[in-house]
Image (spheres, rainbow, N blue to C red):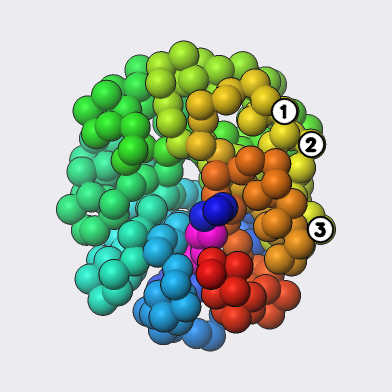
Amino acid sequence: MIEIIPSLSVMNGKCVRLEQGNFDKKIVYDDNIIDIAKRFEDHGIKKVHLIDLEGAKARRLINYDALELVARHTSLEVNFGGGISTDGDLAKSFEYGAKSVTIGSIAFTNRALFTSWLITYGRNKVTLSADFENGKVRHKGWQESSDADLFEHIDYYYQRAVQYLKCSDTSKDGLMKGPAFDVYKKIIDRFENIKLVASGGVSSIEDIEKLADLGVHGVMIGRAFYEKKITLKDIEKLLS
């Protein structure tokens, strides 16, 4: 069964969504982060992905208090990302309650440091984020493009035993126009031991079922849930 991982993006203490990673195109949701997290917990969700959007932009941790709140007041396993750039940032993430982290920019700009984190903390705790557009890696909170080939980037860490990979097609994120099925199929075929978590574009339960049929390990959902395209009852039914 595919793992369903709701995504909670935090900015100024509020839960928000960005379109294609654009900070000028954000939707702010009124619901309290803890209330949202508890509803997920009540309907069988085991893990959430908490993103520090301000941290991702500033390249340092900012919303670690939100991490602590969710970790302390729910039984959810929190996968945390956004702004982790130093050994201190990573240690602080785990100190404030993260069970695992997802890291993209440092994996792109400082391969030696990211590899050392894989070795030190273990591949169950450190997820590689390889986000892309038109087959090229995007980094620094999706604010910068590159000429780096997505598959070459993944392969570098595949050769170093990375286990978890989160991939987002930034051209689809927040638009609910369907995931990048073709890219995910190629990743699964080429990197057979990687546990792929798909993110971006999910608009329906049917999208999730199609990803499961491809062999995707997990899927992150965001805007489709907040705008009721996917409901808690839908998730509960799928999990059962």
> Was residue 14 drawn as part of the magenta stretch in this picture?
no
Which label lies toward us, 1 or 3? 1
Q: Main secondary structure of the magenta part?
A: strand
Q: Residues within 10 Å of mark 3 (few under 14, many from 20)?
A: some
> Compared to 19, does 156 lie above or below?
above
Find out whether the residues at labels 1 and 2 contact each other: C-beta distance under 8 Å. Answer: yes
Going by the image, does 210 lie left or right of 232? Answer: right
Q: Earlier in the sequence, mark 2 or mark 3?
A: 3
Q: Which residue is mark 3?
A: 177
Residue 210 placement (x, y as % from top left): 74, 51
Residue 183 placement (x, y as % from top left): 74, 34
Circle 3 sits in a helix, a strand or a loop, which is it? loop
Going by the image, does 90 lie left or right of 238? Answer: left
Amino acid type, callout 1 = Lys
> Compared to 222, does 193 lie above or below?
above
Instruction: Examine the image and state in which quarter residue 149 appears.
Output: top right
Q: Which residue is located at x 51 percent, y 16 percent?
A: 156
Q: Residues within 10 Å of mark 1 (few under 14, many from 20)?
A: few
Residue range of the region highlighted in magenta in the rendering? 4-9
Q: Which residue is located at x 61 percent, y 17 percent?
A: 152
The answer to whether one can see residue 175 in this image is no
Q: Which residue is mark 1?
A: 186
Q: Earlier in the sequence, mark 1 or mark 3?
A: 3
Circle 2 sits in a helix, a strand or a loop, which is it? helix
- Disc 2 versus disc 3: distance between alpha carbons? 14 Å
> Compared to 41, does 166 lie above or below?
above
Q: Which residue is located at x 65 percent, y 68 percent?
A: 223
- Disc 1 versus disc 3: distance between alpha carbons? 20 Å
Amino acid type, callout 2 = Asp
Q: Which residue is mark 2?
A: 182
Q: Which residue is located at x 56 percent, y 39 percent?
A: 196
